[in-house]
Amino acid sequence: MSAGPSAVPDSPAEADSLRAQIFQRLHPRAYLERFLAENVRPDGRAFSEWRDVSLNVGSISTADGSALVRMGDTTVVCGVKAEIAEPELDHPDEGYLVPNLDLPAMCSSKFKPGPPTEEAQVLSDRLNQALVMSGVISLSSLCIHSGRSVWTLYVDATCINYAGNAFDATLLAMVAALKNTRIPQASFDEESGRTVCSRKNRVPLTLSRFPTSASFGIFDASQILADPTAFEEPLLDATVCVVVDEEPELISVNGVGLGITTTVDSQKTIQACISAAKNRSLELQKLL
Amino acid sequence: MAQNYDRRRINGPEDSYPPIFEEEEEDTLSWNIAKPREGRSPQDIRPIFLQPGLINQANGSAYIETDKTKIACAVYGPRQSKTTTFSENGRLNVEVKFSPFSCARRKAPLRDAEDRSLAVSIHQAVLSSVRLELLPKSTIDVFITIIENDGIEGCISSGTIAASAALADAGIEVLGLVASCSAAALGDEIWLDPTEKEARKSEGTLILACMPALGIVTNVWQSGRMTVEKATQCLDLCQERCTDIHAVVAQSLLETSKAS
């Protein structure tokens, strides 16, 4: 990888692989089509095969809860920081859950330093919907004193290596980090109006649901590619993302792109995605 | 409207503050100069775990972990410079980013002065090792993300090591590997590679970056109160450690290049 395509090849095998690399750069679509015609994907997976996932929790001591997820080469770290804030007037008993995903310039050459890219904004919003709307944690459990003091959970994820399907990896990292989070026991003092916490006693959060997601790419209107890589993503006609909880019950289905129409065929596609997502969720739940 | 309101992110409440604790942290009060260093001897540094090449999207990368300090570094380039003016030498660009959960207090995602000063130190430390004269019209971007921070001194020295290893991993020509070590002066003693707590208690700190293979110093940063003799003593001790660090870095680069 590091040598790049400019290196002079020494052996015939190296020359072949160099030719393949150049072809991949110049004609990415044809490159992918030729693989798919042989019923295999460029990284050697079958269409419905997922990449290996590993999960590591609690390794960051400065965070109240943390998780590191590797999905294939995609790497996401997530840390939870608990802070205290005043609740909103119309929801005096509800805390805040603030999920954000950062796609820094380090994770891929397609991102530039600076404010969040459009992709990061869209992903953060979808993560917010998946977490807040699905009720992963009841916001009233974050209340310390009604109307005066509540917990704010900042769930910040940073992508270290962007090799495709960041949404699935980040959602898993966020749920795992929340599950790992221990917040200090807090009490509100009415006289001074201050909230004080105990350094010794920390309590875990009570999560009510464990959402996990499964993303699929639709290529050429008929081929469903599970867990698309960064190379496949821009070539896809459409992506379908299915979020399910531990039951597995459906939380959301999100389809974007041209490939999904209202014909009978495409309904079958979505149904196939949903049933595959349920199977995938069983595997991911084991890690949590 | 709160100053950290950003339409492009999911925003929380306008104002929030970290928890306030009833009891003071015990060990901040009980330490005094006469007491020996906890956990390791004064001239010991924290064990280094260095893994080049973890970020396959980048041309070169390195992940470094020294106890609690965790830093990831990626190198992109050499690639075409964005500026239109011709430059005979390449440009080296270093950016440091703290992840929001990396410090004891949450860091809002807006860039502050701390990132910049760290970036400048690391830039200085590696700049003179890179053969930029071979890369006209190009830019090398070094992106560093601090995942967990245990003392700014440790971040600068580990960041420098990671940046230099990542540049080597990217196959960019350098004169030598840059190793870096920090020292803190506490009373009569010198503690190498101080943690955040130790650095806070010290009278002064010194960070040395050098190319041990050539015996050339690339950057020295001293802050706080220190006599000249003390500073020289720190330099000597740091330089000694840098030689050890250099061996660790070279070894891990060798193993990675053999494996691939």
Image (cartoon, coloured by chain):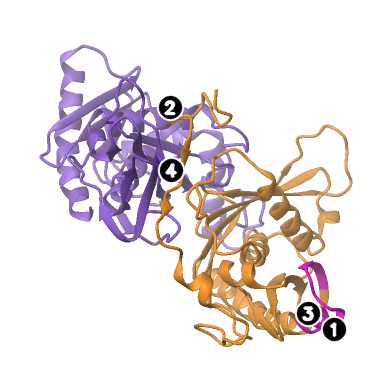
Question: Same subunit under labels 1 and 3?
Answer: yes
| Residue A69 visible, this orientation | no
User: How many other residues sit within 10 Å of disc 4, few (<14), some (14-19) or many (≥20)?
Assistant: many
Q: CA distance from mark 4 to mark 3?
A: 39 Å
Q: In this figure, which residue is indicated by the disc labeled 2?
A: A122
Nearer-the-camera pick, A198 or B7: A198
Query: Which residue matches tag 3?
Result: B235
Chain depicted in purple:
A
Say if B155 sits above or below A170 in the image. Answer: below
> In the shown orientation, is residue B130 left or right of residue A139?
right
Tag 4 secondary structure: strand
Q: Position of residue B211 (x, y in %)?
A: 77, 73
Query: What residue range appears in magenta?
Result: B217-234
Q: Earlier in the sequence, mark 4 or mark 2?
A: 2
Dot label at residue A173: none
Quarter of the rendering occupied by the N terminus of chain A: bottom right
Q: Are marks 4 and 3 in contact (CB under 8 Å)?
A: no
- Residues packed near mark 2 inside 10 Å, few (<14), some (14 to 19) or many (20 plus): some
Tell me the CA gap for discs 3 and 2.
49 Å
Label 4 to label 2: alpha-carbon separation = 15 Å
Number of callouts:
4
Label 1's element? helix
Find chain B in the image and tell me its colour: orange
Q: Chain of mark 3?
A: B
Residue under pointer 1: B229
Mark 4 — residue?
A156
